[in-house]
Image (tube, grey):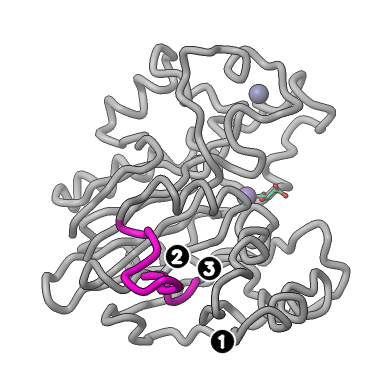
């Protein structure tokens, strides 16, 4: 399977338009768009995993996703959503010019996109879209897709109380090559099933939003510890666990994604970045292509 890492930043991207923190103000650090992937079993039919507001630029930057061969053809057939957050769903509106896509998501996410942020109703008027509940062991585009519920953190805009899961991780398995990708850009904690979910994975991309629990303090109006409330396990916690897992499964490549603009790991000169790299975990740039 082929994977394009389209974006690697958390909501707001990097730099963030209203942030003058030292990392955002450093012109030597490469910009990052909001996180999402494109994934394909055969290199010709592609699925997006999350649709960020940066999706137009992300598609145009990837030759594999360019329109054609017919005047209105696109290799993009659908979108899988890990959650209903705006940084992962606003891009659906940007895709309205197409003939319509198949969207796969957990039930709470589909309901939010119907009732709280009515994307379904909006884009359905522009094309033939389909909206399906993602099953736990489904074939999509020639890949086996498994789903792990990871959190019940609902988006700020969603008023309605409804049962989760609100956030899932995906495991994509290519039956032809044996390649396995796990994508978990939003993790409130490392759930007990996490180790089994990543077992035998070739590559795992996981939530690296924040480095530590106090990172937002003093930088924004958010209270100390706000990122725990925001539902993201900090790297300072997850990295210790990844070290243990890498000893058990040395064949797996690990990388952090969904990096918030406040995260010191964005700067390769930081001790935090060096600590992540020393543990064998990567911080991939946007537009990284993987073949598994
Ligand atoms: C998150 O990942 O916590 C959300 O995307 C935050 C946001 O609304 O940008
Ligand atoms: Mn986010
Ligand atoms: Zn910043």
Q: Nearer the viewer, residue 237 or 152?
A: 152
What is the distance, in whole Å, between disc 3 and disc 1 at their CAs? Answer: 12 Å
Query: 39 left or right of 106?
Result: left
Q: Position of residue 171 (x, y in %)?
A: 35, 69
283 sits to left or right of 246: right
**Magenta stretch: dominant secondary structure:** loop
Disc on the earlier residue, 3 or 1 = 1
Instruction: Please name which of the two marks, 1 or 2, marks the residue nearer to the observer.
Output: 2
Q: Residue at x 59, y 79 (%)?
A: 106
- The relative height of residue 29 versus residue 38 in the rendered view (above or below) is above
Residue 96 appears at what percent x and percent y?
63, 70
Residue annotated with mark 2: 48
Residue 66 highlighted magenta (yes or no): yes
Residue 230 coordinates in the image, percent (x, y):
70, 47
Q: Quadrant of ligand 3?
A: top right
On the image, numbered disc 3 is attached to which residue? 168
Q: Residues within 10 Å of mark 1 (few under 14, many from 20)?
A: some
Q: Residue at x 40, y 39 (%)?
A: 286
Q: Which numbered dot is residue 24?
A: none
* Front: mark 3 or 2: 2
Out of 49 and 57, give the one closest to the viewer: 57
Residue on which the image places disc 1: 133
Q: Specify the quadrant that holds the N terminus.
A: bottom left
Mark 3 to mark 2 CA distance (whole Å): 15 Å
Give residue 43's quadrant in the image: bottom left
Give the residues in magenta: 64-79
Residue occupying the far right of the picture: 159
Crowding at dot 3, Cα within 10 Å, few <14 / some 14-19 / many 20+, comes out as many
């Amino acid at each position: 399977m082929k994977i394009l890492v389209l974006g690697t930043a958390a909501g707001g991207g990097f730099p963030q338009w209203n942030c003058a923190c030292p990392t955002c103000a450093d012109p030597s650090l490469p910009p990052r768009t909001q996180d999402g992937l494109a994934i394909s079993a055969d290199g010709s039919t592609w699925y997006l995993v999350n649709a960020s507001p940066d999706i137009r630029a992300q598609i145009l930057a990837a030759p594999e996703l360019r329109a054609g061969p017919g005047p209105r053809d696109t290799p993009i057939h659908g979108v899988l959503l890990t959650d209903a957050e705006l940084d992962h769903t606003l891009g659906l509106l940007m895709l309205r010019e197409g003939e319509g896509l198949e969207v796969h998501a957990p039930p709470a996410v589909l309901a939010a996109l119907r009732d709280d942020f009515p994307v379904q109703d909006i884009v359905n008027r522009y094309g033939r879209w389909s909206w399906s509940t993602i099953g736990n062991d489904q074939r999509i585009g020639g890949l086996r897709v498994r789903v792990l519920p990871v959190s019940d953190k609902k988006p700020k805009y969603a008023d309605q109380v409804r049962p989760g899961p609100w956030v899932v991780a995906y495991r994509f398995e290519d039956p032809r090559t044996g390649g396995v990708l796990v994508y978990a850009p939003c993790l409130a904690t490392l759930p007990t099933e996490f180790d089994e979910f990543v077992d035998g994975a070739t590559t795992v991309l996981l939530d690296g939003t924040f480095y530590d629990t106090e990172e937002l303090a003093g930088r924004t109006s958010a209270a100390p510890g706000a990122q725990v409330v925001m539902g993201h396990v900090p790297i300072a916690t997850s990295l210790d666990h990844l070290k243990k897992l890498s000893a058990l499964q040395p064949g797996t490549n690990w990388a952090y994604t969904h990096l918030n603009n406040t995260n010191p790991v964005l700067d390769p000169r930081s001790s935090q970045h060096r600590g992540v790299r020393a543990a064998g975990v990567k911080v991939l740039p946007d537009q990284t292509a993987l073949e598994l």
